[in-house]
Structure formats: C-alpha cells, structure tokens
Amino acid sequence: MLKVNASARIGNTFDISFADGSLFQILATDTYSSKIVALLATAMQLHSVREESEIGLSQTFKIIVSSFGSSMAELKGLPCKLISEDKSGTSCALPVSEDRQIVALQLISLSEIISGHARKKGGALMHGALAEYSNQAIMMAGKGGVGKTTASMRLQPPWRSLSDDATLVVLDDEGKYWAHPWPTWSSFFMPGGSGGIWDTQRGRPLEGILFLSQDEKDGIEPVGKGESAILLQQSSDNFIQPVHQILNKEKMRPLYLQAFDNICRLVRHVPCYKLRVSLNGAFWEKIEQTIFVHQGMKDGKGNSFANFSLE
C-alpha cells in the first residue's frame, strides 16, 4: 500500500483552487474514505482546512466521500459510485478494497470529479507534460512512448518540469487559459510504484502546445487549428475513458461533445506546434525562440529574444 503523509482522520477536509477561480473542498466521512482522500491530498498537494468557518463556504464545490463494504462484483466493476450531484457539489461512495489497482482507480475517479468540473467551464484534461519557463507554461503532448517524460527530464534551467504525463487546462472569466500539473496516476498502478507528488495548484498561463515526435534534428513548426484539435481530442479521450466506469453511454455522449467544443476553442487561442526532438539536441531553445520571441522575454543567459530572427 502507498505511504500516506497527510492525516487520515475522519472528517478531515482538504481544499484545492485553480487559476480560473474554482475552489473545491473534499470531505471524507469514515475511516476508509479518509485514507483514500488522504492519499489524494498527498499526491495532489491539497491544503488541509483547519478552521470550521472555512468548511462549506457557499462559493466552493463540495465533494463528500464515504465508503461501504460491497464487493466490486456487486458494483459491476465500479471503483466509485455517484450518489448525488448538483451545482453545489457531489456525493460519492467507494467500495472498501485492499487491491492496489482498485485504490488507484478510486483516486482517478475522485480526481475526475475535479477535472470534470473544469471541463464544464471550458477546460480540459490533457495527455501532455507541463513545463514552466519564466512563470509561463507550455504543454508537450503526444501518444504514449513518444518521449514526454524523457523530454521533461532533459529540460535545463531556467526551465522547470511541472508534470510529465498529464495537464489540466482551465479557462478563466477573462478568456485566458491556464495550465496546472496533474498526477501521473499510472505510477500508482505499477508494481513497486510509490505514486508521486504534484503541485496541482501551481497554475501558469498556457503560452503554447507542442506535439512531440522523435527526429535526427531539433525543429519546430506551426500546426493548423484543425489538425491541432484532432490531436488534442485524442489526448483528451485518454482521460475521459476512465469515466466510462462511472457514467452510462447516454451521459458520455454530451461529455465527449463538450470536450471537443472546449478543445476547438482552445486551439483558436493558444498557438500549437510540432516539435521534433533529437537524441542530444537542446530542443528547449527552439521553444524559447519560437514561443517567447514575440513577448520581449529574456533567455536563461539574460539575452533578449526581441532581436531574434526565425529566418
């Protein structure tokens, strides 16, 4: 079983906020749900709500988590059962289990409640690594095995990798997109895996989306909005699929349509590129020169990009 650093006391409440102004509070009501919520709080770096006056604020979306002793067979394989849902919050129940894979699926289910709320407001959960440069962010997307994790590890200061597999994109009231790191839940499935910790509340303005491919030489080029939407939809699908275990087909169809609408709007406002990454090249310099050249920013050596030419 994974180690829990957060307190697993019954009744513990944790909160999480995003750059779009959303605020969530997660409350566990019994021993088992407290352990699962504590795992979630550790992985996503949630804040503990200690003052009674902070619990149940009207502007928050509340997630009430309980558990029961039914077997997975009785639930037809569901790791999480939705009990009720409205504009103010969600109530759900988890079947008690000692199986590592089921516990991981329960963590995914709880996190999907949060990311699903962002999707309703115009955001999307993407299969992409998130990196920060001078307090701004880019997302490196691509199919599994293309090298997102490796590329994240190769980034040099002042670059900083925020996540290597998943990114939550949110849309604020002014029409600006922000990106938050999201847990690599697959690390909770793997035998011997210890999970991980991600600062999910570290939101940064999303300045570009890059679709990775391996090549002999580093290179970068713009991608059309139509192609970008298709590629991002495929990334988004990877994270919507687990919801099949909770929702029926009738409820899944509008979810897919909403996700695609959000992606189409996203690519109209955030530039997208194809990024070719070589084995030993400094590909991040291509990103700096292409995305940040028009912003009058400086590179890690203090040189201004304002005078840089792409020709």
Image: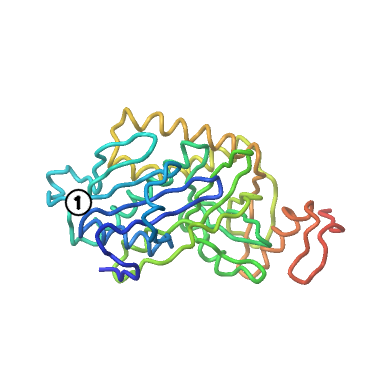
Place of residue 224 in the rendered image (x, y in percent of width and height, measured from the top left)? 66, 38
Place of residue 245 in the rendered image (x, y in percent of width and height, measured from the top left)? 28, 42
Place of residue 93 in the rendered image (x, y in percent of width and height, measured from the top left)? 23, 47
Q: Is residue 194 left or right of residue 257?
A: left
Q: Residue furthest front?
A: 53
Residue at the image position 65 percent from the left and 48 percent from the top:
273
* Crowd rating for badge 1 (residues with CA inside 10 Å; few <14, some 14–19, many 20+): many
Q: What is the quadrant of the N terminus in the image?
A: bottom left
Residue ID for mark 1: 67
Amino acid type, mark 1? Ser
Residue at the image position 63 percent from the left and 38 percent from the top:
175
Q: Nearer the viewer, residue 284 or 74?
A: 74
Residue at the image position 31 percent from the left and 69 percent from the top:
4
| Above or below 250: residue 239 | below
Q: Is residue 250 left or right of residue 197?
A: left
Q: How many marks?
A: 1
Q: In the figure, residue 257 lies in which quadrant?
A: top left
SS assignment at label 1: strand
Q: Nearer the viewer, residue 310 or 106?
A: 106
Place of residue 289 in the rendered image (x, y in percent of width and height, measured from the top left)? 76, 58
